[in-house]
Amino acid sequence: MSSLDEINKARERWEKVLLSKNPVDPARTTSGIEAHVVYTPSDLEEMDYLRDLGFPGEFPFTRGVYPTMYRGNLWSMRQYAGFADADESNRRFKYLLEQGQTGLSVAFDLPTQMGFDSDNPMVRADVGRVGVAVDTLRDMEILFDGIPLNHITTSFTINATAAIILAMYLAVAEKQGVSMDKVGGTLQNEILKEYIARGTFIFPPRPSLRLVVDIIDFCKDRLPRMNTINFSGYHVREAGANAIQEAAYCLSNAITYIEEVLKRGIDIDDFAPRIAFHLIVGLDFFEEIAKIRATRRLWAKIAKERFKAKNPRSMMLRLFCGSSAREATLREPLNNIIRATIDMMGIVFAGAQSASILSYDEAYTIPTEESALISLRTQQIIGYETGITKVVDPLGGSYYLESLTHRMEKEIRALMDEIEDAGGMLRCIETGKIQMDVLKNAYETEKRKQSGEIVVVGVNKFVDEQKQDEEIVLTQINPNLARRQIERLHQVKAERNHPKVKKALEVLKEKAMGQVNLVPFVLDAVKEYATVGEICDTLREVFGEHRESVVL
Amino acid sequence: MIRILIGKPGLDGHDKGAKTVAMALKNAGMEVIYTGRRQSVDQILNAALQEGVDVIGLSILSGVHLEVTEELMARMKEKGVEEIPIVVGGVIPKKDIPFLKQMGVKEVYPIGSPFEDIVKGIEKIAQRQR
């Protein structure tokens, strides 16, 4: 084997003889890390295989959280779905499951996510628009009608109203005769990123964190199959952060949440095995894979060294990945199928446990059945036809990938230290520092797209002017939808036991003013068919509403 | 100095567009007031009147641009302030641009509109008003 010394000398010669005669512009990843023309073993001088990579399923889990990864079981394919009302969404769920999807991922409309009922005049235009409208338990019953909750796990993109949706899910499971310990799924339940980027917060940070921890605490002993929080980098990345910021903010938020849970005297190993992560994989292929491997390794170290976890499962970064919808284009939307495919390849090489990729029409609106099917087929073709899944972490050992993974770990760690020095994530969110840093990056990125420095095929390069007015078949919002949903809501309200609802809300309010875990009381209210709006208004009375301070 | 208010009506939280445009306008020397998210049409209009802005911009990605613009125009008429120029940006299909202009919108900036164009366009609009 050639020694590193020999390789270095050979490289110098090569640079002198060949590289200098073929000059190229410097290149960087999207987060600004320079990329050499070629990488060699010398670039991995600092790497120690057993320390830095090891074996899949073992600390530091760089190569994968499970020993056989996809050779044993493919990732779970769960396309994000939900729109209009529970009937329509139930049909879409069943369709996707029939077509081979292995789990569900529910999209809720904005009123549901933000604690408003469909009959609130302020939200009429938003009912059922970006996800399914859920006002009461009745909607959830219809949503999961004919879907066996002892077999299917469901991921819920829900945050401020996570306790309500969890309660509804449990109530539906109970009606199906499925015991709590069999109910499986994921709750996003990650409020900090709502303040930074996504925007569906309701209450101020402290009571919101209380609710997050109430859910984690409630589930840890009762629902062993429920992942109770998804530390998310996805949304802040879509809002304009770069890959390093995405990972750093995600992990820094994770630290904040964990510290809140630990404050209650709960042991790290009692809940950490059930936390999960949500990151993006976009088109800068190697950077994304490196980012995820670096984050996986970093998390393992943080869990072990900072939080003194003993159970290896607490150190495993179990990952739900999304593709980069931000990189999808309005023009020539079919090109987005290719983009989603590349994202999905990256997701597989990165070793995610669960995936949902964009549909080609998603820059316009939510997917049609056809476009959702193509996304599912993309996952299936990669999973079953390509052979990538036969070997764990097949790109591991690539000189470039390992060098980039190592470098990204350093950069992510450095930014995390910066945030810690500035007082921690909560402080940085309150002062608007994170939002401003994200906005600056978003602005610079947009300028580089507008100048053509960042190429977007079909949009700023290779533009077909005739395709400008292309019409594609889109999901149409049924104009009667809001009215129908409101009718259903009013019917439920008419049929329920009003004194019991009133009592449940009174008790909830009383408990909210104290310190006790609120989930059981939300569950009581939900079972009486209290509405999302009623429950949230009750909590608003106690917690107040968060007013966003605008950072420009 | 041109004063412009950028409003984000409805519940949609995708404000990267509104904020990056606001930043571009600010860098071009305008005074920009961004209302933040979750604004009703009334809140946007009241803020614009309170701040005495020269132009109002709406950022709409959720497809409700025709309804929202219609509502804004109606409220402005009620208050007798229709002369304040309106611009709209976001996910606006080309075929809807004529409808918006018919309603009185001065310029429409669909996704991908270069910052330069938006800056120049708003400068022109504000000048015409003076």
Image (cartoon, grey):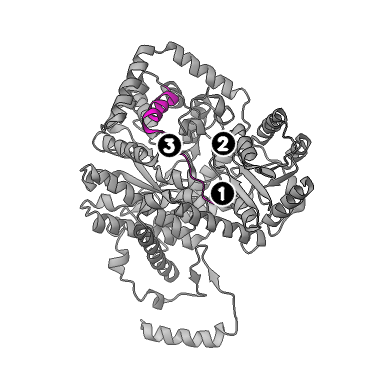
Q: Please give the name of the residue rendered at 35% of the width and 28% of the height, measured from the top-left corner.
A: A167
| Residue A380 appears in the picture as rendered | no
Q: Please give the name of the residue rendered at 68% of the width and 58% of the height, measured from the top-left corner.
A: A460
In the rendered structure, the answer to whether residue B118 lies left or right of residue A324 reads right
Residue B39 is marked as 2
- The residue under label 3 is A158
Badge 1: chain ID: B
In the rendered structure, the answer to whether residue B93 lies left or right of residue A97 reads right
Q: Amino acid at mark 1?
A: Lys
Tell me the magenta residue range.
A531-552
Q: Amino acid at mark 2?
A: Gln
Residue B16 is marked as 1
- Determine if marks 1 and 2 fall on one subunit: yes
Closer to us: mark 1 or mark 2? 2
- Estimate the spatial distance between the alpha carbons at disc 1 and disc 3, rounded to whole Å: 21 Å
| Disc 3 crowd, CA 10 A, few/some/many (<14, 14-19, 20+) | many
When the figure is inspected, residue A59 is found, relative to residue B84, above or below; the finding is below
- Determine if marks 3 and 2 fall on one subunit: no
Q: Is there a contact, CB below 8 Å, between mark 1 and mark 3?
A: no
- Determine if marks 1 and 3 fall on one subunit: no
